[in-house]
Image: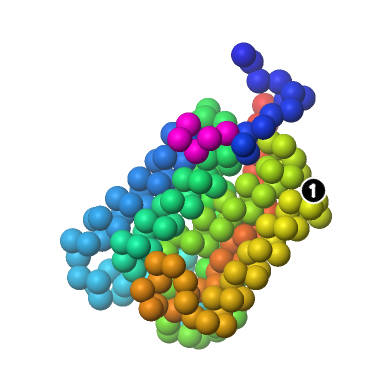
Amino acid sequence: MPFDADTPRDDARQPVFNAPWPAMALTAIIVGGYLVQGFFPIEQVAQAGAFSAAALEEGRWFTLVSALFLHGGWAHALMNAGFALAFGTPVARSLGGHPRGVAVFALFYLVCGVLANLGYAAMHRGDPALLVGASGAVSGLVGAAARLIAGHGRPGPILSRPVIAFSAAMVAVNLLVAATGVAPGANGATVAWEAHLAGFAAGLLLFGPAMRLARAS
């Protein structure tokens, strides 16, 4: 059936096992990326592509993106892959499977990840601590999914009840992680909770423009 822009959709409630191929591809990239990463010494990988506030100040801007495709262990990679599939499914479906929609989905994911890392750097200026993982970008997908739930398949109001509930839960969980230093899949590593919140905020704010861009004629 042809898509009518004025017809309400309920993309946010579609089952994950019926995931569109862009969400499945993203999941495969996260898992496959860590599989490839395992063929190289961890120190070499970290020095080459991990992000840090110090690296940013040194002009290594590419690490804003490269760090999104590196992970600290299988638990870390699989957890991010699972969240990417769960929250990327409604987002990818709402943006559409046509070339423009797929391109916007990829761009949205990367921009949220970059802004997440920049948010972390803003709070840790000059810090050489290395940051890897897709969780900042995935948090952007969580923010976008919250907007979809609020709008029943379209970007709902940021101040709607579902978005506020998602935001409160996101802040509470990440503040708990900040206080305890414990998070699933972290394997004792420091958790960049600041990046999670920055990515989530980016997803909330940018999903509306992303939807308009994806559906522009």
Q: Which residue is drawn at 73% across and 54% down?
A: 163
Q: What residue type is labelled 1?
A: Pro
Dominant SS type (magenta): helix
Q: Residue at x 68, y 57 (%)?
A: 166
Mark 1 neighbour class, 10 Å CA radius: few under 14, some 14 to 19, many 20 or more? some
147 up-or-down from 2: above or below: below
Q: Is residue 1 visible?
A: yes
The quadrant of the image that shows the C terminus is: top right
Nearest the eye: 215 or 87 = 87
Question: How did the renderer colour the structure?
Answer: rainbow
Left or right: where does residue 140 sit relative to residue 168? left
Dot 1 corresponds to which residue?
A: 157
**Residue 101, image x and y in percent?**
56, 34
21 up-or-down from 128: above or below: above
Is 215 in the magenta?
no
Q: Which residue is drawn at 62% across and 60% down?
A: 200
Nearest the eye: 214 or 134 = 134
Image quadrant assignment for residue 70: bottom left
**Residue 155, image x and y in percent?**
72, 42
Q: Give the range drawn in magenta.
A: 14-18
**Residue 66, image x and y in percent?**
39, 62
